[in-house]
Image (cartoon, rainbow, N blue to C red):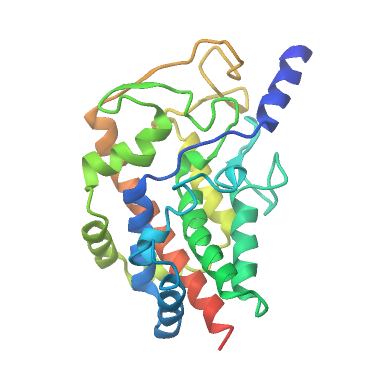
Amino acid sequence: MPPSRFALACVLLATPFTAAAWGPVGHHTICEIAYAELNADARAEVDRLVALDPAYENFATTCTFADHPERLRREEHYMNSPRSTRSLASHECPQADACVLTAITKDIAVLEDPSSSDAERLVALKLLGHWIGDVHQPLHVNFADDRGANWIPTVGECERNLHATWDSCIIESQIGTDYAVIAATLSAEITRADRIDWAYDAPVEWANESFRIAIDPATRYCVDKEDACWYDEDNFILSPGETQKTLTINRAYLRRHKGTVETRMQQAGVRLGATLNRVFEAQD
């Protein structure tokens, strides 16, 4: 890459952007699964905190708080990495002071701190449910120049962009729109072995899982070339003013990734539930 282009790439990769998250159905499903995973003490504390905010009917509905009615802590919904990245090895954000990994740590700390007020704990609870959902959406562990695939327009079965395809289109077209029904179905499929396998991984491992899905050729997010993941076959990085690639999303693509999205929601729910069980158990 010529020096001037490399410098531009560095600027782009360091620039924060607003990415969508799982749509409401995805986030609510994850937190409904998590709620079913809570032990009696954790459930009682979650219920007590959620009851302090009349805007929400239950824990599941609080999990879009970070997106609505306004976007909170914008840079903490995702994590950017260089296009040469193959694996994430650190709990630190690769290209920023804050990202979804540090957000998870920050709000767990608020919940664990006995000096935190109920108001602070409630906000942390609502945010934590969102962050753990976000880190399980594959395109939230991404590259900044294409805005986490928001700058990859799509046509066909999802006429928005590749990020939105994973946020909402796969769920709504292949899985459903009633989060309570989806959560009940997915929860029933989670085995004891799944819980053992998923519950104690660290957030950086959750991010790595998402990143591997994002850069898998089947996702069509990027092109593996010269030890990096290029924006397109002939373009390493999407620079301002350049033509964006357009992908056609057909039913086969949606069907192919349905199981992956279901598993990511199950994993997020189990891990969020296990995290809350540990946090509130430590306060007994």
Residue at (40%, 17%) from the top-left corner? 246
Residue at (71%, 19%) from the top-left corner? 8
For residue 78, which quarter of the picture? top right
Does residue 222 sit above or below 185 in this rendering? above
Q: Quadrant of the C terminus?
A: bottom right
Q: Nearer the viewer, residue 119 or 90?
A: 119
Q: Quadrant of the N terminus?
A: top right
Residue at (67%, 31%) from the top-left corner? 15
State the image coordinates of residue 157 (x, y, percent, origin top left).
25, 27
Q: Nearer the viewer, residue 76 or 118?
A: 118
Q: Left or right? Give the position of 112 relative to 137.
A: right
Q: Nearer the viewer, residue 74 or 132?
A: 74
Q: Residue furthest front?
A: 54
Does residue 269 sit above or below 153 in this rendering? below
State the image coordinates of residue 65 (x, y, percent, origin top left).
46, 54
Q: Residue furthest right?
A: 3
Q: Nearer the viewer, residue 48 or 215?
A: 48
Count of marks placed on residues: 0
State the image coordinates of residue 145 (x, y, percent, origin top left).
59, 25
Residue at (44%, 85%) from the top-left corner? 41
Does residue 132 sit above or below 235 in this rendering? below
Q: Left or right? Give the position of 96 relative to 239.
A: right
State the image coordinates of residue 94 (x, y, percent, origin top left).
69, 42
Q: Left or right? Give the position of 280 relative to 226.
A: left
